[in-house]
Amino acid sequence: MSTQTDQQRRILADMGIDVWLLRDKAGKTVNLPAVDPSNDALSALSSLQNEVQSCQRCGLSQSRTQTVFGSGNANADLLLIGEAPGAEEDRQGLPFVGKAGKLLDAMLFAIGFTREQVYICNVLKCRPPNNRDPQSNEVESCAPFLNAQIEIINPKVILALGRFAAHRLLLTEAPVYKMRETINVLPATDIPVVVTYHPASLLRNPMQKAQCWDDLCKVHQLLEKADS
Ligand code: URA
């Protein structure tokens, strides 16, 4: 078996998960998708990003270093949505580049993806000061940008990372453990939304990692189903 398989096994073991491998992805060489500059989704995302960069819809525009729009493949089958940029993301202008992001990379790798193959963004495009929770007016102000990202990327599956993403997408206040019990669907679409714990929560509560692994397996199965 390839080195990648061993590496995936090690990552899962580090996540505190007893390892078995996904049948199809295990050991498969990862081919990065070619980026076509004339790609419609790419140019639509880049116009939207320009709009976000100058956004002043809420008070977070006053305290941000820069906006954090999102990154990855504009034609991704899998879209991951987190909460809001933290200090490192605000500094670099990219989502999930801090500690939680490293864990997210490992989680993605474990199901056979690199972050360049998926698309990653947040509910909020600006960092809330002192990493406080997003406020509802901020979520509302930013919602049109998130909705537009979803529409442009048109993913086959969405993975909601944590309660803020899940609540925004599914328009509910249900707790994460409840939303994990079922495959949810993005309202007014047929896009399945898998809800899991936020990577930062996994860092604080390693017991949640096994459940998160179950959720990643759900994502993998849904993607396979969508391809068949
Ligand atoms: N937490 C998030 O929800 N998003 C990031 O980009 C970083 C940390």
Image (spheres, helix red, strand yellow):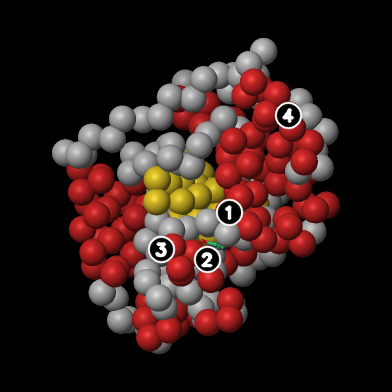
**Percent coordinates x, y for residue 165 in the rendering:** 54, 62
Q: Are marks 3 and 4 in contact (CB under 8 Å)?
A: no
User: Label 4, label 1: how many angstroms apart (C-alpha)?
Assistant: 19 Å
Left or right of residue 148, residue 40 in this image: left
**How many other residues sit within 10 Å of disc 1, few (<14), some (14-19) or many (≥20)?**
some
Residue at left 79%, top 59%? 205
Q: Are marks 2 and 1 in contact (CB under 8 Å)?
A: yes
User: Label 3, label 4: how many angstroms apart (C-alpha)?
Assistant: 31 Å
Foreground mark, 2 or 1, reads 2
Q: Which residue is mark 1?
A: 101
Please give the label number shown on residue 88. 2
Determine whether the residue tagged by mark 1 lies in a helix, strand or loop.
helix
Depth check: give the residue in front, 53 or 138.
53
Q: Who comes first in sequence, dot 3 or dot 1?
A: 3
Q: Who comes first in sequence, dot 2 or dot 1?
A: 2
**In this picture, is 82 found above or below 11?**
below
Please give the label number shown on residue 93. 3
Q: Is mark 1 within 8 Å of ligand 1?
A: yes
Residue at left 67%, top 13%? 1
User: Label 2, label 4: how many angstroms apart (C-alpha)?
Assistant: 28 Å
Amino acid marked by disc 2: Glu
**Percent coordinates x, y for residue 95 in the rendering:** 47, 58
Q: Are marks 2 and 4 in contact (CB under 8 Å)?
A: no
**In this picture, is 208 found above or below 139?**
above
